[in-house]
Amino acid sequence: MDYISTRGSAPSLDFEGATLAGLASDGGLYLPAQWPRFSGEDFAAMRGLSYVETAVRVIAPFVGDSLSEDELRDLCTQAYGRFSHAAVTPLVQLDHRHWMLELFHGPTLAFKDVALQLLGLLFEKFLSNRDTHLTIVGATSGDTGSAAIDAVAGRAKIDIFMLHPAGRVSDVQRRQMTTVLAPNVHNIAIEGSFDDAQALVKRMFNDADFSSRFDLSAVNSINWARLVSQVVYYVYAAVRLGAPEKPVAFSVPTGNFGDVFAGHVAARLGLPIERLIVATNVNDILYRALSSGDYSQGTVTPTATPSMDIQVSSNFERLLFDVGGRDGRALAEQMKGFEATKAMQLTNAQREGAAHLFSSARIDENGMARAMRWAFDAADMVIDPHTAVGLGAALQTDLDPSVPVVTLATAHPAKFRDAVERATGVRPSLPGRVGDLFGREERYTTLPGTFDAVTSYVAAHAVPRHG
Ligand SMILES: *Cc1c(COP(=O)(O)O)cnc(C)c1O
């Protein structure tokens, strides 16, 4: 399987190369040159399969020759063996129409674990035959950081530098990162927003001098291997709700557009998805882009859903490429314009291409709290604020009522205890698997959000590239 860049001028890579590179050298994102297709029989044959076996079937065509099927199965078995629920991502019914896909049973309590537990193992596997020391740099609005750190802490040939916006992640999120004291883990609190942190990371990749000194890689959802592991749970859930015969809709609490793009990939594979609902909070660039074609960056408003407090959604570029004619050169121009003016208009092809599958809803803090209370009253379930944004959007849908609507439950409610308590009066307790989080020592460095400050720090602590 060949991977090409959305900006048309980086060399194409195989799965191993795309995984290790993260971002393409022309600033674009990697996508398969062609989508694999699954038949109705292929999906029907997944009906009784475990999560791990489903993962092997869904991921294998994307891996190509980079891993044997047995190697892939072995990595999936290890990654998903660390989840606390035997179904890995259980599907829970809310009422006659609404379902919840619980993605938070991994070690750090958010859906990021589904992708990152596997990515950590893929890195280790691919590095074992190379003379390379990987320097992972990433930006997190909270959940990617803890999941990535858990996935790579203590692994050989990897250092991880994780930037989070100082004071803008929850105490549980911060401690899940900063209490991991493995010497290859470097936590940096940036004075600024998540978008500032993400822009710094992108600049490190695009800076020819800096990026030539280290073997940089990414764990943000710009890394293709992350997205492909998220395709699995769309298939797993849809097959349980009647695919391939019956269509399913998904409502996805969205920030960087990674999770919902995995749903788009599932649809490209042939899974009958009736609709993907992109649920945003008041940081609504995607809502505006999908409803009126206006992709323009506003200022970030902090909310009770910090993992969605984003005004530039990196993976949206993948959708614009895939539905807008797959013209890398034109997209590179369009993105350059966006980077210069912080605004762009989608082309007609992009708007129409997206409208086949996507709709969007913007759920403000009141709507979020209402959905949280609805889940509590109607189904006796305590849900996290991000999940509540997704559910709020699902409850508003105008889809035919015969289509089941699955809201992706992206975090465990205990990760955002204060917001849950404000909305429902219930304070969820942390599950036992996180252990003594509040008794442990924290270690992190606070830096101003400037390129010089961050690159000096990374350069002083990273292992330079050989030769
Ligand atoms: C990361 C995250 C999101 C947003 O997912 P994207 O893939 O960035 O769109 C939503 N909810 C939670 C809890 C998250 O951690």
Image (spheres, grey):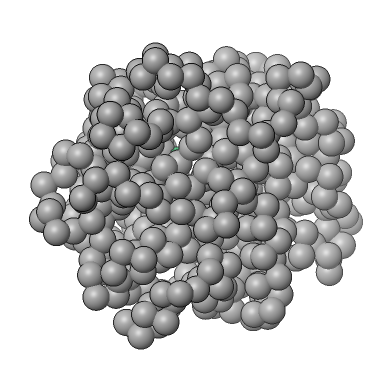
x, y (%) of residue 34?
42, 76
Q: Which residue is depicted at the point 74% across and 40% down? A: 160
Q: Residue at x 77, y 32 (%)?
A: 180
63 up-or-down from 425: above or below: below
Given residues 215 and 112, the one toward you in this image is 112
* Residue 459, x across and y down, in percent: 80, 34
Residue at 50% in and 24% down: 428
Please name the residue shown 25% across and 24% down the image.
370
Specify the quadrant that holds the N terminus. Answer: bottom right
Query: Which quadrant holds the C terminus?
Result: bottom right
Q: Nearer the viewer, residue 183 or 213?
A: 183
Left or right: 308, with 376 as reference point? right
Is residue 78 visible in the rendered image? The answer is yes
Numbered marks: total: 0
Check the image and report above or below for 196 versus 448. below
Camera-side residue of 47 and 149: 47
Whole-percent x, y for residue 397 in the image:
16, 44
Compared across the picture, whether 462 is left or right of 368 comes to right
- 225 horizontally vs 260: left or right: right
